[in-house]
Image: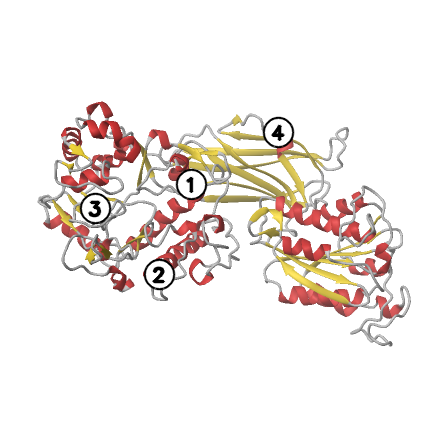
Amino acid sequence: CPEERVDGHVYPGHAYYDAAAILKYNIEQAHDNYAGTFMSYTFYAIVHPDAIYCMGPDGNDFDRVAVLEDLGYWVLVWGGAIHPDDVSSNYIYQNIESDITLNDLASLNAYRIDKHDLVVMVDFTTLMLKAPIDIYQDFINNQPTKEAMYVMSYAESMPTDGYNRGIHSDFFVLKPSNDTFHTIKEAYEAAAYDVASGWGGTGITGFVGDMGTRGFLTYYYRDQSNAIALDNCVYSNTNDDPHAMDGSGVSKCRDGETTCEDCRDKSLSDVYVAQMKDVCGNPWDCWYDENWPADSLCIDFHKRWYQERLAFETNYMDLQLSRTGAFHPEVFLGFCSQKGWQGYTIMLRDIGTCIGELQEKGESVVIPGVFQTQIVTMKAQVWTGNGNSCASGTVTIPTFQPPFNIAVVIDNSGSAYSTFGGTPVADMNADGKANTILDAEISSILQLIQALIDDPELDNNNVNIGVISFTTTAVMEGSFPPADPNDPTKINPDLESNVRSLRALSYTNFDDALDKAIDYFAAAATGRTNVLFFLSDGLPNICGEGDNENCNVDSVVGNNNAHATNFDSELAILDSYQVIRHAIGVGSGSQVSAGSGLDKIDNTDGGAQQVTTTDALVESLTANPVDGEVMSFTLTVNGVAVAGVDKTAVRSGPTGFSWGAFTVSGMDSSLFQTNTITATLAMDIDKNLATTDDQYEVTISQTVTGSVSNWLDGTT
């Protein structure tokens, strides 16, 4: 586990899902794009029993086997290949736990995966730029006496005789065989080792992992009679300096040879496999050395990894994350806000939930007696490798579906400085007076935005907020993603700061406020549901334009003057953008009667509303568009109710009802077995349990298919 880090290996605790997903996706793309003879492949992950449950980025333990299985790995839970009591070397017995632990030797189990012609061992920092199919085929077809192909690392200290360095663990190719596995196992158990002379007195020692898999396989294949050494610049390019100063200050090759190739000079097109942890740094740590030259391979490697990540998100993730990070965006593509792991935008924070490929099913239901069409959805995984699946769902209406462009128009004219009733909201804009109408408007808008953020179906990718303020003239304050890019559970600090900066002053210009709303929707992304919330505490009294007003534009003409309330042209343009318009009168000084300015603006079935308390204002802004309330909620897996799930699990919000995401269990994960998750909601339209003719149920089911075969155990 990351909190028990083993030197020589990379366990990306904060980005485990990302590393595992991109490793698999990268290798798939490299092999699928190969133009030569097709070779089928399967992904395996060998997991030690002690490393199944580890701490995730949210601070909670998660099942790493579940993550890997849901990404499509065949997980083999195998312990260390060597028992400490079987090791003859007293030095190994006493010291290996302080070096790399015997758990490291679990990787030797790769030799046991003997249903394939060859096995390629990689780790999380392996980046495959091209599939080396040619050497695979030559290895299989033309090298009958060879068991492995490997790449040697450089010596970690100088001087070197070429022996104080080991094979790379990020690209090691072998022919699997149980016989070979047992031969290596027995050789390890019998071999002599001490820190001075290394394995069998050969001098193979003095590098990280020298007592584990790296060190022993270096010793075992040292004479190359049964293995092939590969070009490290091509098959495990680290972009490292091949030279270092020896004890006398003379530059020498770090591989012990007289001359050595500088892998940094390789063309990217000539590199098949890159290794990123040593010099270039782990990609999920946003590592960048400002001293790298512009043509550094490290820059190319990082950019390629992040291109693979972006492609994976686009093809497989339900929602893509915002790419707003400003730390070398030309390399990290907006996924890094600063150098170091703290700056990395992880794909999944809660990796115990919804970690596999997802599917969504939706059904329309017409509610009898109400004739409101409601859409009921459920989202679950396509496959289960461990008998679990995430499950979530919604009840919404078809005219109010994400993605959204939401314009919030706030009246901050002088009358908004008046005191407002209801639950106190304090001095929201630090203007020296608490609980004003403007304070209530600011507070309610922030609560609306938080409600949007709390909706599991919404985030910065499918919601945009436009803020418009108006007094004598209107100001387009800006267009913002709702959530903090660094913490998607909180409001965007730029958005909140902007709203809190408003001050009450001057007159009330509805016409210009609508003009600025038009500007927002004209510039906003198309193909979205457009929504306008128009808040005002007073009466329009500024001359408009565009509708034959006979007055000077933006001049004061008096409350409810015809020249201040004639904005038919603006409303027609908003209609062309199909904007749903909610007009809310804030306080008794507002007017929502027929023919009033707010009445003209509102185009919802309920018409413009007037509220006189902070509580009513929040309720008006965050009201659920779905009629009724939830009486009961049940979730079943294969007909068995999920314990602890009831109507309290259903959230009511400004877009409808939502529930989950839950992690449900009890499914059959055997290959191609079908499991059914069913959600049932009992609803009451008039919210009066005594009347039953308006009560109804909506049910939706989703199937999840098992993905585990037991062929390795010979039982299929």
Q: Residue furthest top?
A: 85
Q: Is residue 619 left or right of residue 296?
A: right
- SS class, disc 3: loop
The x, y position of residue 524, in whole percent, is: 62, 63
Q: Earlier in the sequence, mark 3 or mark 1?
A: 1
Vertical position of residue 580 compared to residue 443: above or below: below
**Amino acid type shown at disc 1:** Gly
Read off the residue under disc 4.
646
Compute the Cα span from label 3 to label 2: 26 Å
Compute the Cα span from label 4 to label 2: 51 Å
- Label 1 Cα crowd, 10 Å radius (few <14 / some 14-19 / many 20+): some
Q: Quadrant of the N terminus?
A: top left
Whether residue 571 is visible here, answered yes or no, is no
Read off the residue under disc 1.
13
- Label 4 Cα crowd, 10 Å radius (few <14 / some 14-19 / many 20+): some
- Label 2 Cα crowd, 10 Å radius (few <14 / some 14-19 / many 20+): some
Read off the residue under disc 2.
300
Residue 10, by quadrant, is top left
Q: Assess whether mark 4 and mark 3 are in contact (beta carbons under 8 angstroms).
A: no
- SS class, disc 1: helix
Q: Residue furthest front?
A: 248
